Amino acid sequence: MKQLLVFIRKEFYHVFRDRRTLLIMFGIPIAQILLFGFALTSDVKNAEIIIADHAQDINTGQITAKIKASTYFLVKEANINTNDIEAAFKKGGLKCVVIFPSRFGADLLHNGKAQVQIIADGSDPNTAKTLTNYLTAIITDYQLQISAATALPYSIVPETRMLYNENANGSLNFVPGVLALVLMIVCTALTSVAVVREKESGTMEILLVSPFKPVMVLIAKAIPFLALSIAIFTLILLLSVYVLDVPIKGSISLLYIESILFIITCLSLGLLISNTTNSQQTALLLSMMGMMMPTLIFTGFMFPLENMPRIFQVISNIVPARWYFLIVKAVMLKGLGFEYVWKETLVLAGMTAVLLAIALKNFKTRLS
Amino acid sequence: MKAVTLKNITKTYDKGKVLAVDDVTLQIDRGELFGLIGPDGAGKTSVFRILTTVLLADKGSASVDGFDVVKDYQSIRRRIGYMPGKFSLYQDLTVKENLGFFATLFGTTIEENYALIKDIYEQIEPFKNRRAGKLSGGMKQKLALCCALIHKPEVLFLDEPTTGVDAVSRREFWEMLKRLKQQGITILVSTPYMDEAVLCERIALMQNGKIMSVNTPQHIIATYPVPLYAVKSGNIYKLLNDLRKSELVESSFAFGEYLHVTLKNNDAAGAGNLRNHIAAQGHTNIEVSVMAPTIEDSFIRLTNKKQGSFAQA
């Protein structure tokens, strides 16, 4: 027991004396959270648009005022010539043009029907779609407003609500994703590197020759990273709550227990990788490429799994991060209890057991 | 009971393609300072790894301190000290932390066996708070030796402990080994340096996975079968080429400023004939003298004999 404690202390020395590792461990989560939170957002804010109002009547004025009031747009009013629109798009910056024809108000009042043209820069389809949707919504809203007086015979008013995320905060989806990603990187990569480093420096030979049980080497290596991962997990939670305004709706202790389970999954993977490689580079490449890419793609926080071909959906089932992502989303964002995530937990626990068993069984008590 | 025995040990790598250890049989007595001498790639490290139970042999059996290296590997691991060739300690731990770690790992404390390492540790104690990575090569080796000794092993395995260490530190290191031997520890040490061979009690000369000769260094030198001449002239490079072509000469190798030469006919007139022969080829400042062979001469002779370039002497 004393041996194990001393071994663990030694591992902490390694971590704290290696600035690079420390930077990776605590830099990556902070960078990821800030990047995903502020830079890589799919929300559109302050998009530059031009409103060309050829009518200049009451109705166009009211619509323009409504559009201006929204934080999505940065409105410029100009009588842009139809021929110049393309040039303006090509120059960049401009995202969308709204054109009211000269008899807009008159048509609306007398014919009961008016047209407005919305031209968006389709080279960025996501933004274009979002902007046209926003604009259409504003115009529809205005239409309802003016027809209220005349009382349409039938009217359907969709009342939409974004449940669990009323403000459409984009951070909600990726916080669980980043959690999965960061824990994967830190636990898997750093654990495998820590074991392989002993092989590279020749100290593994001594450890093997010592009476210390070889399997205990793995445990001693894993425990510090387990502790550090829990610290990192806490850091990410704090960042998401206080910086990104993502609330924790469910039980924090359940969240911790599930996360510790996932951390153990990642540690087992790291140990498994370290068993099969002899150089730190290979170990790092394996864990980064072999683990990061599947985590990014198959977890479902960047690309919806439902849109993938069937085969990829099947493959995604063997990615541990996918199940963790589901659990975190359910517990953290929806506030659900264990009774709703026990299936995912069981899958994750099963994976952990298998990985850990293989890792321990494959750990060599000799060099080859 | 012998401290170490190897019986017909064979080890191959890459599924039998590379033969590292070829049918080696060897016995080492208790309390002996035994040297495994051979160039890089001779198979020394493989022998060490088999004996320290971190590698399994393909064929043959071996035991350390009476325990079988396969069956009783755990008992062996408690009884031996091992300093691997590329052992570099934990570079980011201090001297004291390294020593303390290995002491605990082997279930002891620095204080308990301090007497054993006192002589060595005192030399590095002024740097005990320095990180191991910042030590000089010689000091690193001393620290590594302390770490291998801290649990008072019965048998100590040192794989090329002096490689990459300066001459003064090497000499000091061998002094330390002699003192350890007096404490009754069996020491098996490997080295590619022939000059260190004479510092061992017995040596095994190893080449291409085979052991060519096992004996005391003195005996190996004494049984050098033919007279050996040290030869020198004004143009040493031309002399070497001339002698290698000469019909009188059996072998000729450059050693420092002299050539070590053996002749095909070993009669009393050998030296005179050789001098005349060299003079006839236009060399000046000729020196020819009979010399005492070194281990390296024996080693080269044994190696060449194996390869069949000598007539059986």
Image (tube, coloured by chain):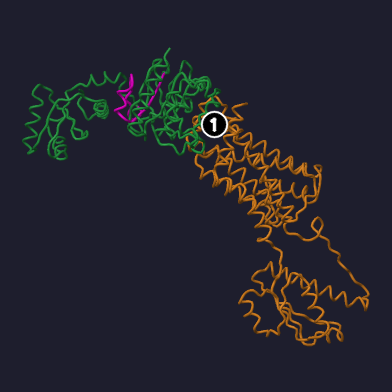
Chain colours: A orange, B green
Q: Nearer the viewer, residue A245 or A264?
A: A245
Q: Nearer the viewer, residue A141 or A190?
A: A190
Q: Nearer the viewer, residue B200 or B209?
A: B200
Question: Could you tell me which chain the residue with mark 1 belongs to?
Answer: A
**In the displayed structure image, the side of residue B298 where residue B112 appears, left or right:** right
Q: Amino acid at mark 1?
A: Lys
**In the displayed structure image, the side of residue B227 where residue A292 appears, left or right:** right
Percent coordinates x, y for residue A12 in the rendering:
59, 38
Report if residue A368 is visible in the image. Answer: no
Local packing at callout 1 (Cα closer than 10 Å; few below 14, some 14-19, many 20+) is some
Q: Report if residue B191 lies within the magenta region.
A: yes
Residue pictured at 81% horizontal, 42% vertical: A339
Report if residue A73 is visible in the image. Answer: yes
Task: Assign a secondary structure to mark 1.
Answer: loop
Q: Is residue B51 above or below residue A160?
A: above
Taking the view exactly as shown, the residue that stands out farthest to the front is B126
Q: Report if residue A48 lies within the magenta region.
A: no
Q: Which residues are magenta?
A: B186-209
Percent coordinates x, y for residue B81 in the rendering:
47, 24
- Position of the N terminus of chain A, as image quadrant, is top right
Percent coordinates x, y for residue A291 in the rendering:
60, 47
Q: Which residue is mark 1?
A: A364
